[in-house]
Structure formats: C-alpha cells, structure tokens
Image (cartoon, rainbow, N blue to C red):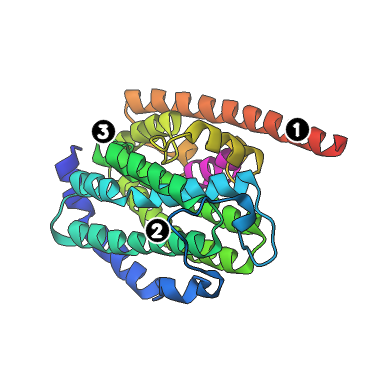
Amino acid sequence: MNDRALLEALEPTVERLFDRHLATTKEWFPHHLVPYGRGRDLDLDDVWQESHADLGGAQIDEAARSSLIVNLLTEDNLPYYFRSIERMFGADGAWGAWAKRWTAEEGRHSMVIYGYLMVTRAVDPVALERARMAQVSGGITPEPSSAADGFVYVALQELATRIAHRNTGALLGDPAGFAVMKRVAADENLHYLFYRDLATAAIELDPSTMVKAIERQVVGFEMPGAGIPGFARHASAIAKAGVYDLVIHHDQILVPVVVRHWGIEGLEGLDAEADQARDRLMARLAKSERVARRVSERREALAAAV
C-alpha cells in the first residue's frame, strides 16, 4: 500500500484518536508552573556562574544540566518537526487538524522549560541561547522516508521523550522542576498513545509495509537533538546518569511497544521481504537485550564498588 492509500484508509482512525485525545488531555498553563519568585533582573555584563543556580535548595550536577539543555533545545526545534509531520501526513482533514493541535501543545513545552531555566538560572543563559541559535538555524531533524516509517518513528520518539523528560525532573531534586518536567511528560505520553495506536491500525491494514518500516526505524533510531552543539557529550552524561540509555531504550521502548503492543512476532500474512525484515528485527532485538544487560551489569558493579 502506497503512502496516499495508507493515509486515506487511516483517516477515520485519525479522527477517532484525535477525539480521544481531546477528551483526555487537560488544559494547563506554563505560567502556573514556573517559580517566578526565584527570578531576578540580570545586568548585561553579568557572567553566569554555577553558584547562581537556585533549585530550591537542591544541587544540580552536569548531567542534569545536559539533560535540561537537550530537552529544551529539542523542543525549540518544533518548526522543523511540524514541517516533517505535515509533509508526511498532509495539511488537510483530520491529519492536518491533528498536526496543528500537536504543534500547539508542543509549543508550550519550550515555554515552560525555558521559563524554569531562566528564573532558576540552572544553566548559563548565554550559552543556552547560542546553542538554540545554532540548533534552530541548522534545522536538523530525522526525516522518515515514508508515512509508515513516520508512524513508527514518532511513536518511539514520543515515548522516548516522555521518559527523558520525566527522568530529568526526578534528577533535579527540585519540586518545581519536577512539576514542570512531569507536566511536559504527560503531554508527550498522550502524543505517544496517539501515534502508537495509529501505527497499530496501520499494521492491521498493511502488516508487510509496517514490519519493514519498523525494522528500518528500530535499526536507525536516533533521539532528537543530533544537531545540538556538543550533543555527544550531553548524551554521554545523560546516559551515565540513567536519564536515557540503552537499557531504558530496550526495556521501556522496544520491548513494550514493538514486541508486546505491536506483537511483531505473531503477525501473519507477511510477504517474503517483510518476513525477512522481521527475522532481522528479532535478531536486532536479541542483540539489544544482550548489550542492555551488559550495560546494566557494569553499572551495578560500579555502584557496588563505590
């Protein structure tokens, strides 16, 4: 099934899932969550120092800073994600209505995280703005090659983002920061459920096309943020802190979504190419599990040695 036929066949599903989303989501306001009482005016000549941070008595480390920076700059790249979503799914009908609503909801995420970072001075505001200019000027985002690939990628990515936001909030040790990240994560969870169930419907319509897309996206999956200056360094710190790493990716994303919810192993009626793709995918998942277990064992050994 080509993109046009798949999108047309799925439009009633999009309408249903969009209605469910609107009935489930809760209205919220960024200004209710930002602790403005911690803010102060800054002189143009002020040079940020780590001691300026005010996280309500909590201490912030470099891993938490890296996670906050990556989370915010990923959200700041929203214009390019909207472009990709509209390109893949279309600007009209239920597809277009969903893309616009999704964009409006995602826009609040950068507002509230940025507000929190500015009033708490948790990160260097000058370095953050320079990184934002570099990130958004570059406009680097994953570009799935088909609608089927898009369904898979956004489902996995929204869940990964939900986990990263929630774990970042827990890492802060600041109730206000946790409330900000928890609220953003709640939005991301609803977006994940929309895309997960959309992909489920697509699997029912055309399992062969979707299995091939799932294999491509699992093998090539990248978290948003590849265009962020110093992304490799930030990603390493985030992984070491347990905010998001290979263990989480395997145990909390690949297994519950690909194996359990989409039931990749039990799908029937696949063409020969899709059957081969499934075999490669299952081998990939087995390898991912072995790597995740080694990472987990090393982490436990290091913790025991401290």
- Circles 1, 3 touching at the beta carbon (< 8 Å): no
Label located before the other in sequence (2 or 3): 2
Q: Residue at x 35, y 59 (%)?
A: 106
Inspect the image, locate mark 3, and give the three-letter code of the amino acid beneath it: Ser
User: Does the magenta segment cover residue 253?
Assistant: yes
- Secondary structure at badge 3 equals loop
Quadrant where the C terminus sits is top right
Quadrant in the picture for residue 170: bottom right
Q: Is residue 124 above or below residue 36?
A: above
**Residue nearer the viewer, 243 or 234:** 234
Image mark for residue 110: 2
Can residue 261 be seen in the rendering of this structure? Answer: no
Quadrant where the N terminus sits is top left
Q: Residue at x 28, y 40 (%)?
A: 137
Mark 1, residue position: 297
Q: Which residues are magenta?
A: 248-261
Mark 3, residue position: 145
